[in-house]
Amino acid sequence: MLITDLTTPALLVERDVLDANLATMSAALPGPRLRPHVKAHKTTALARRQAGHGHEGFTCATVRECEVMAAAGLGADLLLANEVLDTRRLGALVADGARVTVAVDSLETIAAATAGGVREVLVDVNVGLPRCGCPPEKAGDLASAARAAGLHVRGVMGYEGHLMLVPDPADRARMTGDAMAILVRAAEDVGGEIISAGGTGTYLDNTWATEIQAGSYALMDTAYGKIGHPFGQALSVLGTVISVSPDHAVVDVGLKSLGMDHGLPTIEGAQVWFCSDEHTTFAPEEPVRVGERLRVLPAHVDPTVALHEQMHLVDGETVLETWPVDMRGW
Ligand code: PLP
Ligand code: MN
């Protein structure tokens, strides 16, 4: 099959770029040094490819991601790096033999873990991103509460998400060091062997974490493309040019097939003007024809992938495989 046979918009993954990204990352962070975050691609076929590069533990953001990973035989060591109150389906997974460790940052999330049949937790610590995570000085007490409730505390996590896109490498490294000083101090109070943190932006800066939770590196997006990491843009949304005017053209890829929170997408050899529901309007440097196919590069990988039911692994114009985005939904 050729990409001209696909119905657009269609999610494309360039096989060679993907495999180079996976190889680059597994050389930098081999085996358990990386716990790939599956929320970036939501696709068990891609997670299996990451496992083939030596990473057997995975990070998930939702209960459903854990369920689908376990059903695919990839549930040997899942970290749900998120707070969860409704743990009923997690307990069922653990009972079925999956290993699921859950982030906790309150007495309520500890109680939910215990009630749901979860056995292992990490204490989630706020290292500067105003999102989940307990105040660092509370981490030790939460660990004691978790142990008193019968949970095994494997260590800490602390996601420095506010630093991922800091453009200057020296600034990013220094700020990561400051954030991780908080986490390392909390880890002393909590105990356990895991310090889980980091992402694509800080995968090399963060030398304090025992494991890095990067996800975007595999497929990449144009926001991450700006910070100079050695990962290529594997992901695009294939579109069809549906209208051509003297000074602009329109492709059938719009807000409903692109994650837009990191800004406009990019089209090579063109200036993107704006996106609407089903359209991206752009000014091409060279004339384009109605019916022409082109690749639209998203600015943010995770919300883009979550909008699509499948992704097509391609080599140039050839479609090699079609993978269901099977971890979608809740
Ligand atoms: N860990 C957590 C908890 C996250 O929310 C994210 C992304 O938002 C990541 C890790 C790393 O992701 P990325 O590779 O996109 O930086
Ligand atoms: Mn993201």
Image: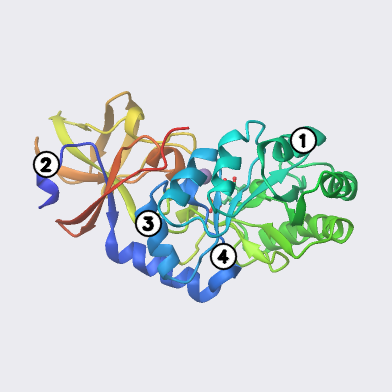
Q: What residue is shown with label 2?
A: 292
Local secondary structure at mark 4: loop
Query: Around disc 2, counting alpha carbons within 10 Å, would you say few (fewer than 14), some (14 to 19), or many (20 or more)?
Result: few
Note whether ligand 1 is within 8 Å of mark 4: no
- 190 to 249, vertically: above or below: below
Local secondary structure at mark 1: helix
Which disc, if any, is residue 34? Answer: 4
Instruction: Judge left or right: residue 105 versus residue 95.
Output: right
Earlier sequence position, callout 1 versus callout 2: 1
Farthest bottom residue?
Answer: 27
CA gap between label 3 and label 2 equals 29 Å
Q: Residue at x 34, y 56 (%)?
A: 234
CA gap between label 1 and label 3 equals 34 Å
The front one of 277 and 328 is 328
The answer to whether the residue labelled 2 contacts the one labelled 4, judged by CB atoms less than 8 Å apart, is no
The answer to whether the residue labelled 1 contacts the one labelled 2, judged by CB atoms less than 8 Å apart, is no
Earlier sequence position, callout 3 versus callout 2: 3
